[in-house]
Image (tube, helix red, strand yellow):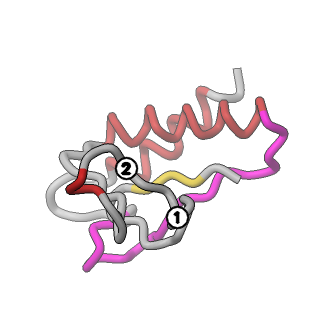
Amino acid sequence: MPTVTVGYDCSPRWSRESRFQLKTLDYPYEPIVINNTPEKFEMLCEEGIQFARRTGAPALFVNAWNEWTEGNVLLPEKRHGLGYLEAVANASKSSRT
């Protein structure tokens, strides 16, 4: 099932045997999201919902609700306020049409 994340995602969603063309991305490569905004996250949620529909996945997972040390925070915070929660709500609403 598709998974979206605001920041660091520690779950192994790729083949660890994969080799990357850039030598700096060789194992142990860990994907990290940088320069994220609620607007970008909303687009990611919309794409995830569309992917779930195309593939028949029953749900879209959102990685972490309050992983402050990993940068995965949907809870209200100083920088973006309710932005990430609103992004999830907006993506959910727009995907119903």
Please state which of residues 70 and 38 is positioned toward the viewer in this rendering.
70
Q: Which residues are magenta?
A: 55-73
Q: Indicate yes or no whether the magenta region holds residue 61.
A: yes
Residue at label 2?
20
Residue at label 1?
17
Give amino acid for label 2: Phe
Check the image and report above or below for 68 versus 96. below
Residue at the left extreme? 79
Badge 2 element: loop
**In this rendering, position of residue 55 left or right of residue 27:** right
Q: Which mark is residue 46?
A: none
| Quarter of image, res 26 | bottom left
**In this rendering, position of residue 94 left or right of residue 32:** right
Badge 1 element: loop
Quadrant including the C terminus: top right
At x 62% / y 58%, what residue is drawn? 61
- Separation of marks 1 and 2 at Cα, in angstroms: 10 Å
